[in-house]
Image: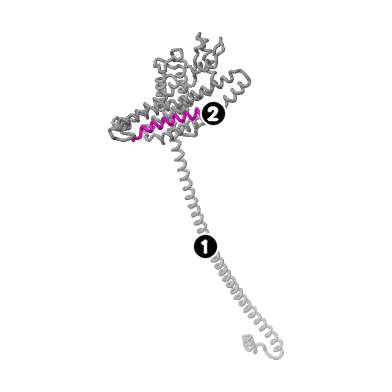
Protein backbone atom coordinates (compact mmCIF):
# COMPACT_ATOMS: atom_id res chain seq x y z
CA UNK A 1 0.00 0.00 0.00
CA UNK A 2 2.79 2.36 -0.83
CA UNK A 3 2.36 5.29 -3.10
CA UNK A 4 4.94 6.21 -5.68
CA UNK A 5 5.40 7.57 -9.18
CA UNK A 6 3.56 4.57 -10.64
CA UNK A 7 0.43 6.60 -9.95
CA UNK A 8 1.53 9.35 -12.31
CA UNK A 9 2.61 6.80 -14.90
CA UNK A 10 -0.80 5.16 -14.74
CA UNK A 11 -2.55 8.51 -15.32
CA UNK A 12 -0.43 9.02 -18.43
CA UNK A 13 -1.13 5.50 -19.73
CA UNK A 14 -4.81 5.99 -19.00
CA UNK A 15 -4.86 9.23 -20.98
CA UNK A 16 -3.14 7.59 -23.96
CA UNK A 17 -5.45 4.56 -24.00
CA UNK A 18 -8.57 6.69 -23.63
CA UNK A 19 -7.37 8.94 -26.45
CA UNK A 20 -6.69 5.92 -28.66
CA UNK A 21 -10.12 4.45 -28.00
CA UNK A 22 -11.77 7.80 -28.63
CA UNK A 23 -9.87 8.27 -31.87
CA UNK A 24 -9.70 4.81 -33.44
CA UNK A 25 -12.11 2.45 -31.72
CA UNK A 26 -15.29 4.25 -30.81
CA UNK A 27 -16.10 6.15 -34.02
CA UNK A 28 -15.85 3.21 -36.49
CA UNK A 29 -17.95 0.93 -34.30
CA UNK A 30 -20.67 3.46 -33.54
CA UNK A 31 -20.69 4.46 -37.21
CA UNK A 32 -21.15 0.83 -38.24
CA UNK A 33 -23.93 0.46 -35.67
CA UNK A 34 -25.69 3.60 -36.86
CA UNK A 35 -25.35 2.57 -40.49
CA UNK A 36 -26.75 -0.85 -39.76
CA UNK A 37 -29.64 0.67 -37.84
CA UNK A 38 -30.26 2.94 -40.84
CA UNK A 39 -30.14 -0.05 -43.19
CA UNK A 40 -32.56 -2.03 -41.05
CA UNK A 41 -34.91 0.93 -40.88
CA UNK A 42 -34.80 1.31 -44.65
CA UNK A 43 -35.35 -2.42 -45.06
CA UNK A 44 -38.39 -2.34 -42.82
CA UNK A 45 -39.78 0.68 -44.62
CA UNK A 46 -39.24 -1.05 -47.97
CA UNK A 47 -40.99 -4.16 -46.67
CA UNK A 48 -43.97 -2.08 -45.53
CA UNK A 49 -44.09 -0.32 -48.87
CA UNK A 50 -43.89 -3.63 -50.72
CA UNK A 51 -46.75 -4.96 -48.61
CA UNK A 52 -48.87 -1.91 -49.39
CA UNK A 53 -47.99 -2.19 -53.08
CA UNK A 54 -48.93 -5.85 -53.08
CA UNK A 55 -52.36 -5.24 -51.59
CA UNK A 56 -52.90 -2.40 -54.05
CA UNK A 57 -51.89 -4.64 -56.94
CA UNK A 58 -54.17 -7.39 -55.66
CA UNK A 59 -57.07 -4.97 -55.51
CA UNK A 60 -56.35 -3.76 -59.02
CA UNK A 61 -56.13 -7.33 -60.28
CA UNK A 62 -59.48 -8.14 -58.69
CA UNK A 63 -61.02 -5.08 -60.35
CA UNK A 64 -59.62 -6.08 -63.71
CA UNK A 65 -60.87 -9.60 -63.26
CA UNK A 66 -64.35 -8.41 -62.37
CA UNK A 67 -64.40 -6.08 -65.34
CA UNK A 68 -63.22 -8.84 -67.64
CA UNK A 69 -65.88 -11.15 -66.27
CA UNK A 70 -68.53 -8.52 -66.77
CA UNK A 71 -67.50 -7.74 -70.33
CA UNK A 72 -67.28 -11.45 -71.11
CA UNK A 73 -70.87 -11.87 -69.88
CA UNK A 74 -71.98 -8.94 -72.01
CA UNK A 75 -70.24 -10.40 -74.98
CA UNK A 76 -71.81 -13.79 -74.46
CA UNK A 77 -75.34 -12.46 -74.18
CA UNK A 78 -74.79 -10.31 -77.28
CA UNK A 79 -73.51 -13.35 -79.12
CA UNK A 80 -76.48 -15.35 -77.97
CA UNK A 81 -78.83 -12.65 -79.12
CA UNK A 82 -77.10 -12.50 -82.47
CA UNK A 83 -77.20 -16.28 -82.81
CA UNK A 84 -80.93 -16.38 -82.09
CA UNK A 85 -81.43 -13.62 -84.63
CA UNK A 86 -79.49 -15.52 -87.24
CA UNK A 87 -81.36 -18.68 -86.46
CA UNK A 88 -84.73 -16.94 -86.76
CA UNK A 89 -83.69 -15.34 -90.02
CA UNK A 90 -82.48 -18.66 -91.38
CA UNK A 91 -85.68 -20.32 -90.28
CA UNK A 92 -87.79 -17.63 -92.01
CA UNK A 93 -85.67 -17.88 -95.15
CA UNK A 94 -86.07 -21.61 -95.21
CA UNK A 95 -89.83 -21.32 -94.79
CA UNK A 96 -89.97 -18.83 -97.59
CA UNK A 97 -87.92 -21.04 -99.87
CA UNK A 98 -90.08 -24.03 -99.05
CA UNK A 99 -93.22 -22.05 -99.73
CA UNK A 100 -91.85 -20.76 -103.02
CA UNK A 101 -90.86 -24.25 -104.04
CA UNK A 102 -94.26 -25.56 -103.14
CA UNK A 103 -95.97 -22.83 -105.11
CA UNK A 104 -93.78 -23.46 -108.14
CA UNK A 105 -94.44 -27.15 -107.92
CA UNK A 106 -98.15 -26.59 -107.65
CA UNK A 107 -98.12 -24.25 -110.62
CA UNK A 108 -96.19 -26.75 -112.68
CA UNK A 109 -98.52 -29.49 -111.64
CA UNK A 110 -101.50 -27.32 -112.66
CA UNK A 111 -99.97 -26.64 -116.07
CA UNK A 112 -99.24 -30.32 -116.55
CA UNK A 113 -102.76 -31.21 -115.57
CA UNK A 114 -104.19 -28.67 -118.00
CA UNK A 115 -101.91 -30.04 -120.64
CA UNK A 116 -103.02 -33.58 -119.90
CA UNK A 117 -106.66 -32.49 -119.91
CA UNK A 118 -106.18 -30.76 -123.23
CA UNK A 119 -104.51 -33.76 -124.85
CA UNK A 120 -107.12 -36.05 -123.30
CA UNK A 121 -109.83 -33.83 -124.62
CA UNK A 122 -108.20 -33.94 -128.09
CA UNK A 123 -107.97 -37.71 -127.99
CA UNK A 124 -111.54 -38.05 -126.74
CA UNK A 125 -112.71 -35.78 -129.52
CA UNK A 126 -110.77 -37.80 -132.08
CA UNK A 127 -112.13 -40.98 -130.56
CA UNK A 128 -115.67 -39.60 -130.64
CA UNK A 129 -115.20 -38.52 -134.21
CA UNK A 130 -113.83 -41.93 -135.10
CA UNK A 131 -116.70 -43.54 -133.29
CA UNK A 132 -119.22 -41.24 -134.78
CA UNK A 133 -117.65 -41.70 -138.22
CA UNK A 134 -118.02 -45.41 -137.84
CA UNK A 135 -121.60 -44.96 -136.80
CA UNK A 136 -122.35 -42.36 -139.33
CA UNK A 137 -120.47 -43.95 -142.21
CA UNK A 138 -123.31 -46.03 -142.58
CA UNK A 139 -125.93 -43.40 -142.62
CA UNK A 140 -124.53 -39.92 -142.56
CA UNK A 141 -122.09 -38.20 -144.74
CA UNK A 142 -119.19 -37.13 -142.70
CA UNK A 143 -118.72 -34.01 -144.57
CA UNK A 144 -122.21 -32.85 -143.84
CA UNK A 145 -121.75 -33.20 -140.12
CA UNK A 146 -118.31 -31.66 -139.85
CA UNK A 147 -119.62 -28.48 -138.39
CA UNK A 148 -121.69 -30.32 -135.87
CA UNK A 149 -118.77 -32.38 -134.78
CA UNK A 150 -116.57 -29.38 -134.37
CA UNK A 151 -119.16 -27.81 -132.14
CA UNK A 152 -119.33 -30.98 -130.11
CA UNK A 153 -115.55 -31.08 -129.81
CA UNK A 154 -115.59 -27.58 -128.48
CA UNK A 155 -118.08 -28.47 -125.81
CA UNK A 156 -116.04 -31.35 -124.40
CA UNK B 1 11.06 -18.91 -4.24
CA UNK B 2 14.27 -19.55 -2.43
CA UNK B 3 16.62 -22.16 -3.68
CA UNK B 4 18.97 -22.51 -0.70
CA UNK B 5 16.60 -22.59 2.24
CA UNK B 6 12.91 -23.30 2.59
CA UNK B 7 10.77 -20.20 2.73
CA UNK B 8 8.59 -19.58 5.72
CA UNK B 9 4.95 -18.86 5.02
CA UNK B 10 5.33 -15.20 5.83
CA UNK B 11 8.37 -14.90 3.59
CA UNK B 12 6.40 -16.45 0.76
CA UNK B 13 3.51 -14.03 1.22
CA UNK B 14 5.74 -10.99 1.59
CA UNK B 15 7.75 -12.01 -1.46
CA UNK B 16 4.53 -12.26 -3.46
CA UNK B 17 3.30 -8.91 -2.25
CA UNK B 18 6.50 -7.02 -2.99
CA UNK B 19 6.65 -5.00 -6.18
CA UNK B 20 9.46 -5.05 -8.64
CA UNK B 21 10.38 -1.36 -8.52
CA UNK B 22 13.17 0.90 -9.65
CA UNK B 23 14.84 0.78 -6.22
CA UNK B 24 15.20 -3.00 -6.42
CA UNK B 25 14.11 -3.27 -2.78
CA UNK B 26 10.85 -3.29 -0.94
CA UNK B 27 9.61 0.30 -0.64
CA UNK B 28 10.12 1.36 2.96
CA UNK B 29 8.30 4.69 3.19
CA UNK B 30 4.62 5.10 2.42
CA UNK B 31 5.09 7.73 -0.24
CA UNK B 32 8.20 7.96 -2.40
CA UNK B 33 7.81 9.74 -5.71
CA UNK B 34 11.24 8.63 -6.84
CA UNK B 35 10.16 5.02 -7.27
CA UNK B 36 8.16 3.38 -10.03
CA UNK B 37 6.67 -0.11 -9.76
CA UNK B 38 8.02 -1.69 -12.93
CA UNK B 39 5.82 -4.79 -12.75
CA UNK B 40 2.57 -2.85 -12.36
CA UNK B 41 3.52 -0.42 -15.11
CA UNK B 42 4.58 -3.25 -17.44
CA UNK B 43 1.43 -5.32 -17.01
CA UNK B 44 -0.78 -2.28 -17.02
CA UNK B 45 0.66 -1.10 -20.34
CA UNK B 46 0.72 -4.59 -21.89
CA UNK B 47 -2.87 -5.32 -20.91
CA UNK B 48 -4.04 -1.84 -21.88
CA UNK B 49 -2.37 -2.21 -25.25
CA UNK B 50 -3.91 -5.66 -25.66
CA UNK B 51 -7.36 -4.30 -24.74
CA UNK B 52 -7.29 -1.38 -27.16
CA UNK B 53 -5.67 -3.58 -29.82
CA UNK B 54 -8.54 -6.06 -29.66
CA UNK B 55 -11.09 -3.24 -29.72
CA UNK B 56 -9.22 -1.59 -32.57
CA UNK B 57 -9.19 -4.83 -34.58
CA UNK B 58 -12.94 -5.11 -34.24
CA UNK B 59 -13.32 -1.42 -35.07
CA UNK B 60 -11.10 -1.52 -38.14
CA UNK B 61 -13.09 -4.40 -39.62
CA UNK B 62 -16.49 -3.10 -38.52
CA UNK B 63 -19.05 -3.18 -41.28
CA UNK B 64 -22.66 -2.13 -41.37
CA UNK B 65 -23.44 -5.50 -42.93
CA UNK B 66 -23.80 -8.80 -41.13
CA UNK B 67 -21.24 -8.72 -38.28
CA UNK B 68 -18.99 -11.61 -37.30
CA UNK B 69 -19.03 -13.03 -33.79
CA UNK B 70 -16.08 -10.99 -32.57
CA UNK B 71 -17.51 -7.81 -34.03
CA UNK B 72 -20.84 -8.66 -32.43
CA UNK B 73 -19.23 -9.11 -29.03
CA UNK B 74 -17.40 -5.79 -29.25
CA UNK B 75 -20.54 -4.09 -30.55
CA UNK B 76 -22.54 -5.39 -27.60
CA UNK B 77 -19.88 -3.99 -25.27
CA UNK B 78 -19.87 -0.64 -27.06
CA UNK B 79 -23.64 -0.47 -27.06
CA UNK B 80 -23.80 -1.31 -23.36
CA UNK B 81 -21.32 1.45 -22.52
CA UNK B 82 -23.01 3.89 -24.91
CA UNK B 83 -26.41 3.24 -23.33
CA UNK B 84 -25.05 3.74 -19.82
CA UNK B 85 -23.24 6.91 -20.88
CA UNK B 86 -26.37 8.25 -22.54
CA UNK B 87 -28.37 7.70 -19.37
CA UNK B 88 -25.83 9.32 -17.07
CA UNK B 89 -23.96 12.04 -18.96
CA UNK B 90 -26.46 14.45 -20.48
CA UNK B 91 -24.16 16.13 -22.94
CA UNK B 92 -23.67 14.85 -26.46
CA UNK B 93 -20.35 16.63 -26.76
CA UNK B 94 -18.93 15.31 -23.50
CA UNK B 95 -20.10 11.80 -24.32
CA UNK B 96 -17.82 11.78 -27.35
CA UNK B 97 -14.91 11.67 -24.91
CA UNK B 98 -16.49 10.12 -21.85
CA UNK B 99 -18.11 7.09 -23.50
CA UNK B 100 -14.90 5.81 -25.18
CA UNK B 101 -13.10 6.51 -21.92
CA UNK B 102 -15.63 4.42 -20.03
CA UNK B 103 -15.21 1.60 -22.57
CA UNK B 104 -11.45 1.74 -22.10
CA UNK B 105 -11.87 1.69 -18.33
CA UNK B 106 -14.14 -1.34 -18.43
CA UNK B 107 -12.12 -3.48 -20.81
CA UNK B 108 -8.76 -2.46 -19.41
CA UNK B 109 -9.68 -3.02 -15.77
CA UNK B 110 -11.33 -6.30 -16.70
CA UNK B 111 -8.10 -7.47 -18.31
CA UNK B 112 -5.97 -6.29 -15.38
CA UNK B 113 -8.30 -7.97 -12.88
CA UNK B 114 -8.32 -11.16 -14.96
CA UNK B 115 -4.58 -11.54 -14.29
CA UNK B 116 -5.70 -12.70 -10.86
CA UNK B 117 -7.03 -15.90 -12.45
CA UNK B 118 -3.56 -16.99 -13.57
CA UNK B 119 -1.87 -19.34 -11.09
CA UNK B 120 -0.24 -17.09 -8.46
CA UNK B 121 3.22 -18.57 -8.94
CA UNK B 122 3.24 -18.94 -12.74
CA UNK B 123 4.54 -15.57 -13.87
CA UNK B 124 6.62 -14.87 -10.72
CA UNK B 125 8.51 -18.18 -11.18
CA UNK B 126 9.08 -17.48 -14.87
CA UNK B 127 10.41 -14.06 -13.89
CA UNK B 128 12.56 -15.57 -11.17
CA UNK B 129 14.20 -17.87 -13.74
CA UNK B 130 14.78 -15.05 -16.18
CA UNK B 131 16.12 -12.82 -13.41
CA UNK B 132 18.52 -15.38 -12.01
CA UNK B 133 19.59 -16.44 -15.52
CA UNK B 134 20.52 -12.79 -16.07
CA UNK B 135 22.70 -12.98 -12.98
CA UNK B 136 20.28 -11.49 -10.44
CA UNK B 137 19.56 -12.65 -6.94
CA UNK B 138 16.38 -14.78 -7.06
CA UNK B 139 15.47 -13.47 -3.61
CA UNK B 140 14.96 -10.10 -5.19
CA UNK B 141 13.06 -11.36 -8.24
CA UNK B 142 9.85 -9.68 -7.23
CA UNK B 143 6.88 -9.80 -9.56
CA UNK B 144 3.25 -8.84 -8.98
CA UNK B 145 1.14 -9.46 -12.04
CA UNK B 146 -2.22 -7.97 -11.02
CA UNK B 147 -1.87 -4.22 -11.66
CA UNK B 148 -5.22 -3.42 -10.05
CA UNK B 149 -3.93 -4.94 -6.79
CA UNK B 150 -1.50 -2.02 -6.71
CA UNK B 151 -2.97 1.09 -5.09
CA UNK B 152 -0.90 3.33 -7.38
CA UNK B 153 -2.70 1.97 -10.41
CA UNK B 154 -6.24 2.22 -9.08
CA UNK B 155 -5.69 5.55 -7.36
CA UNK B 156 -4.00 6.85 -10.50
CA UNK B 157 -7.10 6.05 -12.51
CA UNK B 158 -9.33 7.51 -9.81
CA UNK B 159 -7.30 10.73 -9.88
CA UNK B 160 -7.59 10.80 -13.67
CA UNK B 161 -11.37 10.62 -13.20
CA UNK B 162 -11.17 13.40 -10.60
CA UNK B 163 -9.20 15.58 -13.05
CA UNK B 164 -11.87 14.97 -15.68
CA UNK B 165 -14.57 15.92 -13.16
CA UNK B 166 -12.76 19.16 -12.36
CA UNK B 167 -12.31 19.84 -16.08
CA UNK B 168 -15.99 19.34 -16.84
CA UNK B 169 -17.03 21.37 -13.80
CA UNK B 170 -15.11 24.31 -15.21
CA UNK B 171 -16.09 23.64 -18.81
CA UNK B 172 -19.82 23.30 -18.21
CA UNK B 173 -20.35 25.84 -15.43
CA UNK B 174 -17.46 28.24 -16.09
CA UNK B 175 -14.94 29.18 -13.40
CA UNK B 176 -17.39 31.60 -11.83
CA UNK B 177 -20.31 29.22 -11.88
CA UNK B 178 -18.26 26.46 -10.37
CA UNK B 179 -16.89 28.73 -7.63
CA UNK B 180 -20.43 29.78 -6.89
CA UNK B 181 -21.42 26.14 -6.58
CA UNK B 182 -18.41 25.31 -4.40
CA UNK B 183 -19.41 27.91 -1.84
CA UNK B 184 -23.19 27.83 -2.07
CA UNK B 185 -23.97 24.14 -2.37
CA UNK B 186 -25.12 21.95 -0.76
CA UNK B 187 -26.33 23.89 2.30
CA UNK B 188 -27.24 27.35 1.04
CA UNK B 189 -25.94 30.72 -0.03
CA UNK B 190 -25.69 32.40 3.38
CA UNK B 191 -22.12 33.79 3.80
CA UNK B 192 -21.78 31.99 7.11
CA UNK B 193 -22.33 28.72 5.27
CA UNK B 194 -19.62 29.33 2.67
CA UNK B 195 -16.80 27.64 4.60
CA UNK B 196 -19.03 24.73 5.48
CA UNK B 197 -20.13 24.31 1.90
CA UNK B 198 -16.59 24.51 0.62
CA UNK B 199 -15.34 22.00 3.16
CA UNK B 200 -18.19 19.70 2.27
CA UNK B 201 -17.38 19.94 -1.43
CA UNK B 202 -13.72 19.18 -0.79
CA UNK B 203 -14.62 16.16 1.34
CA UNK B 204 -16.96 15.02 -1.42
CA UNK B 205 -14.26 15.15 -4.10
CA UNK B 206 -11.75 13.46 -1.81
CA UNK B 207 -14.18 10.75 -0.76
CA UNK B 208 -15.24 10.05 -4.34
CA UNK B 209 -11.66 9.71 -5.53
CA UNK B 210 -10.32 7.69 -2.63
CA UNK B 211 -13.30 5.35 -2.52
CA UNK B 212 -13.14 4.82 -6.27
CA UNK B 213 -9.47 3.87 -6.12
CA UNK B 214 -9.65 1.99 -2.85
CA UNK B 215 -12.66 -0.12 -3.77
CA UNK B 216 -11.00 -1.67 -6.78
CA UNK B 217 -7.65 -1.98 -5.04
CA UNK B 218 -9.16 -3.57 -1.94
CA UNK B 219 -11.13 -6.14 -3.89
CA UNK B 220 -8.25 -7.19 -6.06
CA UNK B 221 -5.66 -7.10 -3.30
CA UNK B 222 -7.84 -9.27 -1.08
CA UNK B 223 -8.51 -11.61 -3.99
CA UNK B 224 -4.82 -11.95 -4.72
CA UNK B 225 -4.00 -12.53 -1.07
CA UNK B 226 -6.57 -15.30 -0.82
CA UNK B 227 -5.15 -16.94 -3.95
CA UNK B 228 -1.72 -16.81 -2.30
CA UNK B 229 -3.09 -18.37 0.89
CA UNK B 230 -4.83 -21.10 -1.11
CA UNK B 231 -1.56 -21.75 -2.95
CA UNK B 232 0.14 -22.19 0.43
CA UNK B 233 -2.40 -24.87 1.21
CA UNK B 234 -1.12 -26.82 -1.77
CA UNK B 235 2.41 -25.88 -0.72
CA UNK B 236 2.10 -28.08 2.37
CA UNK B 237 2.57 -31.03 -0.03
CA UNK B 238 0.08 -33.19 1.87
CA UNK B 239 -2.96 -34.97 0.47
CA UNK B 240 -5.30 -32.81 2.50
CA UNK B 241 -3.51 -29.65 1.40
CA UNK B 242 -3.61 -30.69 -2.25
CA UNK B 243 -7.33 -31.52 -2.23
CA UNK B 244 -8.04 -28.33 -0.28
CA UNK B 245 -6.00 -26.35 -2.78
CA UNK B 246 -7.95 -27.75 -5.73
CA UNK B 247 -11.37 -27.25 -4.13
CA UNK B 248 -10.73 -23.85 -2.55
CA UNK B 249 -8.81 -22.63 -5.60
CA UNK B 250 -11.63 -23.64 -7.97
CA UNK B 251 -14.33 -22.12 -5.81
CA UNK B 252 -12.47 -18.87 -5.29
CA UNK B 253 -11.50 -18.61 -8.98
CA UNK B 254 -15.09 -19.15 -10.10
CA UNK B 255 -16.29 -16.60 -7.59
CA UNK B 256 -13.54 -14.27 -8.71
CA UNK B 257 -14.84 -14.31 -12.30
CA UNK B 258 -17.81 -12.44 -10.90
CA UNK B 259 -15.63 -10.10 -8.84
CA UNK B 260 -13.33 -9.06 -11.68
CA UNK B 261 -16.24 -8.32 -14.01
CA UNK B 262 -18.27 -6.60 -11.33
CA UNK B 263 -15.39 -4.42 -10.16
CA UNK B 264 -14.57 -3.41 -13.73
CA UNK B 265 -18.24 -2.55 -14.28
CA UNK B 266 -18.51 -0.62 -11.01
CA UNK B 267 -15.42 1.42 -11.81
CA UNK B 268 -16.81 2.23 -15.24
CA UNK B 269 -20.24 3.16 -13.88
CA UNK B 270 -18.81 5.35 -11.13
CA UNK B 271 -16.54 7.07 -13.65
CA UNK B 272 -19.66 7.90 -15.68
CA UNK B 273 -21.63 8.92 -12.59
CA UNK B 274 -18.93 11.24 -11.25
CA UNK B 275 -18.41 12.88 -14.63
CA UNK B 276 -22.17 13.09 -15.04
CA UNK B 277 -22.41 14.85 -11.67
CA UNK B 278 -19.86 17.38 -12.86
CA UNK B 279 -22.42 18.32 -15.54
CA UNK B 280 -25.27 18.88 -13.10
CA UNK B 281 -25.70 22.25 -11.48
CA UNK B 282 -26.89 22.47 -7.93
Relative vertical location of residue B121 with respect to residue A52 in this rendering, above or below = above
The reply to whether the magenta stretch includes residue B271 is yes
Q: Residue at x 51, y 16 (%)?
A: B15
Q: Residue furthest bottom?
A: A139
Task: Judge from the rendering whether residue B220 lies leftward or rightward of residue B172; answer left or right.
Answer: right
Select label 2 or label 1 by which is in front: 2
Decide which of B51, A123 is in the foreground and name it.
Answer: B51
- Residue A46 appears anywhere in the view: yes
- Which is the main secondary structure of the residues drawn in magenta? helix
Residue B255: which numbered mark, if any? Answer: 2
Which contiguous range is marked in magenta? B253-282
Q: Which residue is mark 1?
A: A78
Q: CA distance from mark 2 to mark 1?
A: 91 Å
Residue A35: x and y in percent read 44, 35
Residue A18: x and y in percent read 41, 26
Q: Residue at x 41, y 26 (%)?
A: B210
Q: Residue at x 39, y 34 (%)?
A: B89
| Chain of the residue displaying label 2 | B
* Circle 2 Cα neighbour tier, 10 Å, few/some/many (<14 / 14–19 / ≥20): few
Amino acid sequence: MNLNATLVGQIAVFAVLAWFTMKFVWPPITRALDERAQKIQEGLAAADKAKADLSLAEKRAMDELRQARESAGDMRSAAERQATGLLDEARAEAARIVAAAREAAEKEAGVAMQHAKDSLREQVAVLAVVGAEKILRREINADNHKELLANLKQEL
Amino acid sequence: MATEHTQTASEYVVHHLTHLNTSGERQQVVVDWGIINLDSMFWSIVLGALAVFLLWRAASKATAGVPGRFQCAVEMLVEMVADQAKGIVHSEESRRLVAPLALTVFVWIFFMNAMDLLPVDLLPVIWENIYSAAGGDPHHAYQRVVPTADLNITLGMAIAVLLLCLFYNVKIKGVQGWMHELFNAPFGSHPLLWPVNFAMQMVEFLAKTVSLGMRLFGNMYAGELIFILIAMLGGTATMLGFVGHVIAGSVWAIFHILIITLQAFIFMMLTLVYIGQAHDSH
